[in-house]
Amino acid sequence: MKLPALLLVARIAQGAIPGLMPLPMKVEEVAGRLVIDSGFTVASTGATNARLDAAMKRLSDRISRETGIPLHKGTNRPALVVECKTNSPQTPELGEDESYRLDITARQATLSAATTTGALRGLETFAQLVVPGADGFEAPGVHIEDKPRFAWRGLMLDVSRHWMPVETVKRNLDAMAAVKLNVFHWHLSDDQGFRVESKRHPRLQELGSDGNFYTQNQIRDVVAYAADRGIRVIPELDMPGHMTAWFVGYPELASAPGPYAIERKWGVFAPALDPTRPEAYTFLEDVIGEMAALFPDRYFHIGGDELDDAQWKASPSIQAFERQHGMKSSAELQAWFNARVQAILKKHGKTLVGWDEILSPELSSDAVIQSWRGPDSLAEASRRGYRGILSFGYYLDHMLPAKTYYLNDPPAGLGGEACMWTEYASSESVDSRIWPAMAAIAERFWSPREVRDIDSMYRRMARMSRELEWLGLKHREDRVERLSGNEPNRRLYVLAGVSDATGIEVRRDARHYTSLVPLNRFVDAVAPESENARALEAMAARRNGTDIEALRVSFEQWSMNDTGNRFPEELTPLSKNLSATGAIGLEALRYLESGKAPPAGWIETQRRTLDGFEKPTAEVVLAAVRPVRILLEALNQ
Ligand code: ACM
C-alpha cells in the first residue's frame, strides 16, 4: 500500500510509523519489525568507499549511543545491508543522484542506492526509524522510496559578525546531514571580520579578524568533514561592499584613503573596493586562487549584496573611469566588476554564485543567483537563463515560527538556502537560532511539495529536536540559570519556557548593539519559538478533559510565578505579564467549564490586555499569551 502524504501523516500521528523528518517521498508499511539488539551490524555489498564506511560506523555508534545498547561485533548476518551501484565522486557535487530505497523486515534491512551519497541519505532515515518497542528497541517494517525534490539544500552561516569556532561548524554539519541538507555556505568575510587564513596576503586575517580565523588546515579539515557527510562547502568572500575587514590590512584596496578598523557596529557601511585599479584584480586573483585550491567545490560565492556606493560617488578617479567607459551608474560599474571577477573564477574552474544584486547582462549565464530580497529576482533570473536558489523567506535571524519558513515554497530551480546571519547570535546561542526550525526547512527542500501539514511538521520537528541533541547540538542547552548565578531558579525557568526570543527586526532597535556587546541576557538564552507554548496551544484547541487539567496546572503556575521572583531587573514587566496571563487563562477556563457566558465586554477587554502583553519586552515576546487567546476565541463562539 503506497501512502500518499496525507495518509502517511495520519499513520505517523497514530504512532504506526516513527515521525521521520524530512518525510520520504513514499512509505509503505510492511508487517514485522526488526529488533535492534547488541548484535546489530551494518555491512555493505556493491560499491563502497571510505565515506560510506565512515557513515556506517557513525550509524552504529549513534544507534548504540541513543539506545544505550553496547554493540558487539555480531557473528550473525548483518541487520542492515547497504547496496550501492556506484561510487560518488570524492568531493560531493551538485546534482548527484541522492535517491535510495530502504526495506525493513523482521529478518533484515536493505538499503539500496544508485550512489554512495544516496546511501548516506538512507542511513539517516534508518537512524530515525529506530524507536523503543514493547520490548527493547526496533525498527518497523517499511518499504521506503525516497529522493530529494531539490538538488541544492543549504544553510548559510555568517562567521564574520560573530566568530564560530570549528567545533560549532562541525556539530552543525552533523545536524545538517541528519536532515539531508547538502550545501554549507560559509560566509567567511564581512565588515566585522576576515575569517580565513591567506598565506599570500596574511594581513587579511592578522589585522582583520581579532585572531579569530580558520587556518588553511582547519578549512581542509572542515571541508573533508562535510564531504564525509555528503555536504558541499561553498565559500563566500563578499565584495565589493562588506569588505571593511580586508581594508584594515590593505587600505589601498579601498575607494577612499584609510586607515580602516574592523567594524564593530551592525549595518551597511561605506567602505568599498576600488574596482577601477588593476592592482585590485591582482590581489583578488591571489586570494581567489588560494581559496579555489582550499575549497574543492565548483561553486564560489562573491556576495555582491548591499553595496553602499558613497565612496565611489565621492571619488573623482572612479567617476572619471565610469565616464570613460560610458557607465551611467554605480550598478553598471559593479556589473563590470562582477564580470571581471567571474573571469578570474573561471580561470580557477569556478562558477560564480552571488546575491541577487549581481543580476545583470554582463554576467555569463552559468552564474547562480541567490535571491534574498524577494522571489521576483529569482523569477527574473530564471527568465534571463540563470539558475537560482531561494533564500528570501528563510532568514533564520528573523527568528520566525518554523511554520512560516516551512510554508515558503521555492519555485522551480536549484532549491533553497536558509541564512543564519549572526549579528544577534554567538557560537553559544547559534544552534538554538538554527535548530530545530532548520529541520522544517530541510523538509521543505527535500520532501514532495504537498507535504505541508503544520501539526505533523511540529510534532516531527519536536522529535527531531531531541534527536539532534544526541548528535551533539546545543540548541536545547539550558543557559538560563547563568542569570541567577547558577542557583536553582524554577521561576526563571518557567518564564523562559513560555517566552520567544525576538530576531533582528526587534533587536536592532532595542538597544545599541555592537560586536562588543555580550549576548548573555535572557533573550539570548530563550528559544525563538516556545515548544511549551505550542503544546499548550494544541491543548487549548482540543480542550478534552486532560487538556483542561494540564492547562489549569500551567495557568496556576504562571499566575504565581511573579511572587518572590529573583529575576534580572529587565524581566519585571514580562514576569508580571505572565502572571496576569495565567490569571486570565484560569478565568477563561472557569467560563468554559461552567458554560456560563462571560459578562459583556469581558472577552474584548482580555484580548486587548493580551495584545499589550504580546509586544516585545526585554526583547522577548510572551508566548504564553497564545494558548489563552485560543480559549478566549472558544468562549466567543
Ligand atoms: C544579505 O542579506 N545582505 C544577503
Image (spheres, rainbow, N blue to C red):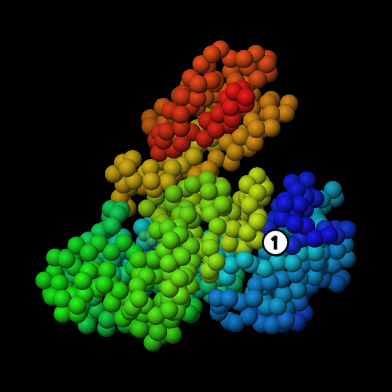
Residue at point 72%, 52% (across, down): 6
Residue at point 52%, 16% (across, down): 602
Please tell me whether residue 522 is drawn above or below residue 114 in the rendered image: above
Name the foreground residue: 49 vs 367.
367
**x and y percent of residue 166 in the render?**
47, 65
| Quadrant position of the C terminus in the picture | top right
**x and y percent of residue 284 in the render?**
30, 79
Q: Is residue 300 visible?
A: no
Q: Residue furthest left?
A: 316
The 10 Å Cα crowd at callout 1, few under 14, some 14 to 19, many 20 or more, is many
**x and y percent of residue 472 in the render?**
58, 56
**x and y percent of residue 37 in the render?**
82, 60
Q: Can residue 422 be seen in this view?
A: yes
Q: Could you tell me the amino acid type at mark 1?
A: Pro
User: Would residue 47 appear left or right of 78 to someone viewing this image?
Assistant: left
**Quadrant assignment for ligand 1:** bottom left
Please tell me whether residue 39 is drawn above or below residue 526 in the rendered image: below
Residue at point 55%, 40% (across, down): 530
Q: Name the residue under label 1.
A: 24
User: Would residue 38 appear left or right of 514 to someone viewing this image?
Assistant: right
Residue at point 68%, 26% (across, down): 548
| Quadrant position of the N terminus in the picture | bottom right
Name the foreground residue: 479 vs 86.
86
Residue 261: image quadrant is bottom left
Name the foreground residue: 317 vs 484.
317
Please tell me whether residue 254 is drawn above or below residue 281 in the rendered image: above
